[in-house]
Image: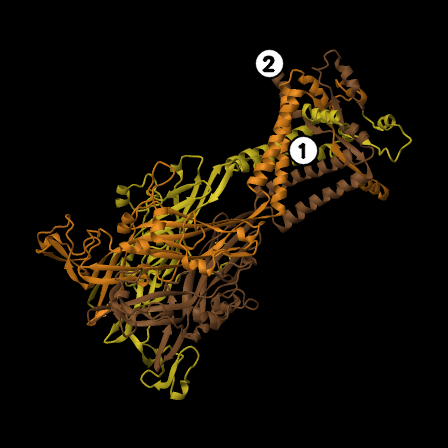
Chain colours: A brown, B orange, C yellow
Amino acid sequence: MRPQIKIILANFFFEYETPRQVLVRNKKVAVACRIIQMGVLAYIIGWVFMYEKGYHAIDTAIGSVFTKMKGLSFTNISGKVRIWDAADFVFPEQGASSFVVMTNFIATVGQKQDKCPELQDGKNTCKTDADCDEGKYKRHMTGRCISNTSTCEIYSWCPVEDDRQIPDPPILLTSENYTLFIKNSITFRQFNVVRSNLVESVNQSYINTCLYHPKTDPLCPIFRLGDIIKFSGFDFSEIARVGGAIGLLIDWDCNLDLNIKYCIPKYEFYGLYGTGKNDKQEKPSLGYNFRYAKYYVENEVEKRTLMKVFGVRIDIIVNGRAGKFDIIPTLTAIGSGVGIFGVATVVCDLLLLYFVPKRDFYKNMKFKHTENPEEKPSLPQSESEKDLPTE
Amino acid sequence: MRPQIKIILANFFFEYETPRQVLVRNKKVAVACRIIQMGVLAYIIGWVFMYEKGYHAIDTAIGSVFTKMKGLSFTNISGKVRIWDAADFVFPEQGASSFVVMTNFIATVGQKQDKCPELQDGKNTCKTDADCDEGKYKRHMTGRCISNTSTCEIYSWCPVEDDRQIPDPPILLTSENYTLFIKNSITFRQFNVVRSNLVESVNQSYINTCLYHPKTDPLCPIFRLGDIIKFSGFDFSEIARVGGAIGLLIDWDCNLDLNIKYCIPKYEFYGLYGTGKNDKQEKPSLGYNFRYAKYYVENEVEKRTLMKVFGVRIDIIVNGRAGKFDIIPTLTAIGSGVGIFGVATVVCDLLLLYFVPKRDFYKNMKFKHTENPEEKPSLPQSESEKDLPTE
Amino acid sequence: MRPQIKIILANFFFEYETPRQVLVRNKKVAVACRIIQMGVLAYIIGWVFMYEKGYHAIDTAIGSVFTKMKGLSFTNISGKVRIWDAADFVFPEQGASSFVVMTNFIATVGQKQDKCPELQDGKNTCKTDADCDEGKYKRHMTGRCISNTSTCEIYSWCPVEDDRQIPDPPILLTSENYTLFIKNSITFRQFNVVRSNLVESVNQSYINTCLYHPKTDPLCPIFRLGDIIKFSGFDFSEIARVGGAIGLLIDWDCNLDLNIKYCIPKYEFYGLYGTGKNDKQEKPSLGYNFRYAKYYVENEVEKRTLMKVFGVRIDIIVNGRAGKFDIIPTLTAIGSGVGIFGVATVVCDLLLLYFVPKRDFYKNMKFKHTENPEEKPSLPQSESEKDLPTE
């Protein structure tokens, strides 16, 4: 056996198989075939490799965001002057990536736990106590009808908030000039790259003076609130009155084959929470509010100031994607490309074997028939061979 | 040289190579081979293309979420009637995608910075001041042992919170009827599609009256807290007492080849933070609480009301995925499929060349041997050819 | 027609085509070719399959995080003893995945809406009222110059915060010993697997006593704040004074072909928000602060305590990735590998046909020429065949 294995091994290493081919000299088919092959080649090289960077391994970023609003508003409500600073108008306060800037509000000062009549909304009129069943759905009623207001008395934080009228113009109109400073840090784990939106060209002196502008200052991390609202398609005076939500997208699309300094963020703005429309692009919808209470104790009674806050909610969303040359996607793309080349050959053969006048001639060139020797045992092997037309 | 290049170019364009093939007429092998090839074809067409939509380019969504809880609770603790509204029981207040709804609490009213005895927990008894070393680990002791309680005196917010007993039944039992309204906006950047969970069929009048139900109202964005708890596998009275965490998944799986109106969300619910079990599905674990202080000043002394809040934490998680026809994944899938076809041919050849009785006959049909001309220089080329059995 | 279709079908099922090949017995080319082919095979099996697990379908996790800080700080500021507990030093309070631990602060107690002189910062000196134009940019001035301080009077929360000096050493130095407990739940939707960081080996008794250490306790979900700061490359006393941001990455890389118990998290720490440097790894930058107000009412006047909080912001980021055997990526990898094999054959053929001395001999073996029969109509088919050198 040993020598036989040796021969097999020798055959394996000293011999290699390569397909036998017919060189078909048929102008029409050959030209068609070359055009198809070149199309495939152009697609693989031009599109897969150059345009889509098929040789890139892709990683998505994990990021974190810190924000800081700055600004001051001055209000003069019926002679009462008041200053609002960031601690007053940003929720939450600690610099999260999603936050609300108050632009308008309805304050109900000095609420305490008590009984008081419901607000008249046109539908809840009562005439006698019988109209005020205790424990009616949602509102907790005492069972008394207050003749003054013609509404039922309820257990509640009293006085009841009156939000039937939204202040117009919005109280904090000067919020347009607030500025937002964003720090964003991203990590491409696979490539071991950490990157911040304070890139090389954004140094301390630039930060001190710059203001984001898509054309002139696209890398400045300081944004004017009025600009953010404008860029996202809202009208400031409208959104400031009733509130609204804005997505601020920090988009990183990095080619790490290049110098890291070309890996820079792009800021985009769009309105959120549109309602369904028939067109693909939904229209952003107005309206964002929430209630918030400041609790305190006065004369041993717990009280609260209820704020119905209308404001601009800003969601900062980080979308990071980095590509870098890697051997696996490269070879996968090549292998897949070779497969598509195979399809090209199949198409050429179909042309040759079915659509060319002398197709039988080419069939004979390309194919050799073997009649099953088991089915024609009487014929010697050499005979069956002779049956084949062109060999 | 010029004419030669011309010939080479002419050969290249007017001639194309196609592999020569043997048509093997062997029933068993041919049938096996056709079955394998058809299996591959069925796999490529049926599974890769139709089921897995291999012709789709895939994008994942970036989304943002706004939430609003509504509801009222009425408590009557030792004759003191109190109303709780959303500003009192939602943390944080501004409509974040992750928030806690208070269902139970231990309030310690009027804490101030002072010295007071530790709470008796069975292990911290002291008899003399010597048992109360000042500055012992974690608790800051004054060094005195209070005979009343037999515990050491500590510097602390006094009185000390007593959380040894969790109120049972939970104080805000009516929280079961709170409702949660969710607005979710997603963006598929690659396809330039923005979409909201308020889809076409969810109009204003529907929102005013609907309540989410997985069968009858799967698109209604208003959820009853009790339902959310039930769907995620918790028991309301248990979770309301000690708290718990729930994941509310908004799942978008969109085929953008179809009309955008078929791109609708699916809501799913599951319990979070289970401890390791041996089965793959972890059981959700109960227990969620945090402490929170409301500060105020009384008679020029800073005080606080410490709330140990037990509640339902709801994490809204958006998982979006959209597919759309794209030429690159299509061709990649085809190319890869052609490659697998090649594997099928290799398998057929193995059958033919190694497992068929007349395998030598087929080997001769398929292969042509070339003896290395360099090694047998004495033989003319035609001679080396003659050595081959069947040509 | 029927019988003919029968024949075609019979041919299709009982006959299969396999390429004819030349076995080239040329040591140099064969060895080169075998080496290339083995390299491709080793790459496909070793790298794509074994190292990169090309047979895996991949899913990324969706996760949610709950945190709980514990600890007590004791301060003695000019004789005033004060205790700080978690409710005092964690923002926000409800256990979010991104939060700030206060380590230092500047408190401005008892601010109320009033007029008061600006803080002297060296640049805003005034001599007469004329220097204080009302409504000057950003600050809202009353128009008076206060001779005492030589600064303009402004409308503001008074007294004005004086943050020119950051307390050094930081006030809450003992924050180093705070502990952070993390619960993390992840879901691999595609594989229907839910998993928590409290894995099998982390039972209740272990949690009660353990403390995270990368070598000895890599799975303990309880972290000392001082350790987190150290692991992320910061110096505690520096970061405690001016604040800083830290990313705590929970990294899951699971092979779900194995038992689920091997799917365990890995905790990593790094500093955030570095400014652009020329090296790839950015240096983390110090400095994190925000302002926060505690409102109260005293003698019917709304007041607030403004806190400028310096602290450690911790962003907990979950990065989950699970792989599981799946037929589609397996076959795609195989198909693509076969494609690359085809490239190997092309390279071997180039060697054979262009770089071997007896290349013409091999060319004749491999290729059969067909002169276009349309162009030489006078020659019978057998004649055109005879033109071919070696058949």
Chain letter for the residue marked with disc 1 in the picture: C
Badge 2 element: loop
Name the residue rendered at 62%, 19% in the picture.
B355
**Residue type pointed to by label 2:** Met
Name the residue rendered at 50%, 39% in the picture.
C57
Name the residue rendered at 89%, 32% in the picture.
C377
In the image, residue B385 sits, relative to residue B113, either above or below, namely: above
Which corner quadrant holds the C terminus of chain A?
A: top right
Q: Position of residue B336 (x, y in %)?
A: 61, 38
Residue on which disc 1 sits: C345
- Left or right: where A81 falls relative to C13: left
- Is residue A271 or residue C133 the one in the foreground? A271
- Left or right: where A176 falls relative to B119: right
Structural distance between the alpha carbons of marks 1 and 2: 31 Å
- Is residue A190 or residue C383 the one in the foreground? C383
The part of the image, by quadrant, that contains residue C353 is: top right
Q: Position of residue B129 (x, y in %)?
A: 10, 55
**Residue type pointed to by label 1:** Thr
- Residue closest to the far top: A378
Residue on which disc 2 sits: A1
